[in-house]
Image: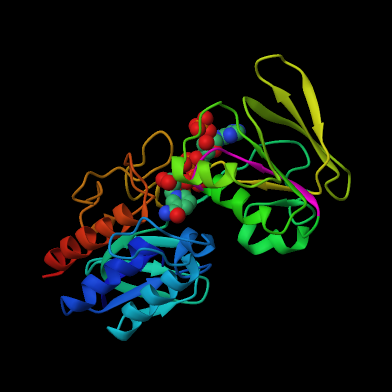
Amino acid sequence: MYDIGIIGGGTAGLTAAIYGQRAGKQTLVFESANYGGQIVFSPNVENYPGIASVSGAQYSTNLMDQAVNLGAETKREQVTEVRETKEGFVVRTPEQEYSCRTVILATGVTHRHLGLEKEEKLTGAGISYCATCDGMFFRGRNVAVIGGGNTALQDAEFLANYCNKVYLVHRRDEFRGDAKNVEALKQKENVEFVLSAVPKEIVGENIVEGLIVTDKKTGEDKKLDVAGIFVAIGHLPKNEIFAELVELDADGFIKAGEDCRTSHAGIFVAGDCRTKDIRQLTTAAADGAVAALAAVKYAK
Ligand code: NAP
């Protein structure tokens, strides 16, 4: 029986593992994709206190090493069910079942899609949700980045280093992301801002050949000649399998306050998958610590 089963190996989950191990509890972290979570794809993290600058990949490696060196166990398995037992909970994956005294849900979020026709069909054929992963395939080509948050701004800056031209398409005139990132983009000669514009149609049957956007002010359509479309319009939770166990809000986030306690005793929640206003590395790390210490107390 593990003391704390942690579902999700991003910043929140791995921080929970660090705090759990340091409190003398045996933790088990489940991760179905990459350890580190979304931040692993960020080229440069510059807003984590005490670390002036680090790549998302390096940060994730450090975090993982720290948790494992403290004795956290990890399973690269997809959790399919959590159910209550007399002693605690059983966490099920396609491979095995694991008994855990308490559970921390740290499942993070997944990419929001544009919802355009052909978006799914052309994913991998010009549509991407990860500039750092796929940017090099578009060296010397024209691309569009959709979104106005820090991810879109950083993606556009990153792609400008490889691509002939980068269109940054955002639905408003003002950016949600940091002014510093906007300023950096303005210095790039091959970046064009396409503001107050929404993507309307993906051009191309088997491969992306362009993107039609509608100007929200004039109602006019314009075709951007791009071979790649990088979608960076935020994230959605993925908590459906826990819906019978813990209360979710209308958007699918797990309901909990700053104490990270869910509606179900013994189950805690940490990071972006929780109801909250600010989703940052720092708040994910803070949640990981709070949830782990609450779980440690509960396990006693
Ligand atoms: P975000 O901040 O939620 O921004 C999403 C952007 O997509 C917004 O500009 C939004 O427009 C736009 N959008 C949403 N739905 C859309 C739709 N259907 N069609 C067109 N546009 C749409 O998401 P994010 O950029 O992924 O960032 C998530 C969090 O991670 C943020 O807190 C961010 O600061 C943080 N982050 C940090 C770093 C770092 O280096 N530390 C790097 C990346 C991200 P509106 O603005 O009009 O709503």
Label count reads 0
Viewer-closest of 66 and 252: 66
Q: Residue at x 34, y 54 (%)?
A: 271
Please check the rendered image and state whether residue 144 is part of the magenta-colored stretch, yes or no.
yes
Part of the protein shown in magenta = 141-150
Q: Residue at x 62, y 42 (%)?
A: 113
Can residue 109 be spotted in the picture?
Answer: no
Q: Quadrant of the C terminus?
A: bottom left
Is residue 9 found left or right of 198 in the rendered image?
Answer: left
Q: Quick check: 129 above or below 134?
A: above
Q: Quick check: 35 above or below 184?
A: below
Q: Position of residue 297 (x, y in %)?
A: 12, 65
Viewer-closest of 146 and 107: 146
Q: Position of residue 278 (x, y in %)?
A: 33, 43
Q: Residue at x 44, y 76 (%)?
A: 61
Residue found at the far right of this picture: 205
Viewer-closest of 9 and 85: 9
Q: Position of residue 130 (x, y in %)?
A: 62, 56
Image quarter of residue 201: top right
Please check the rendered image and state whether residue 53 is part of the magenta-colored stretch, yes or no.
no
Viewer-closest of 62 and 98: 62
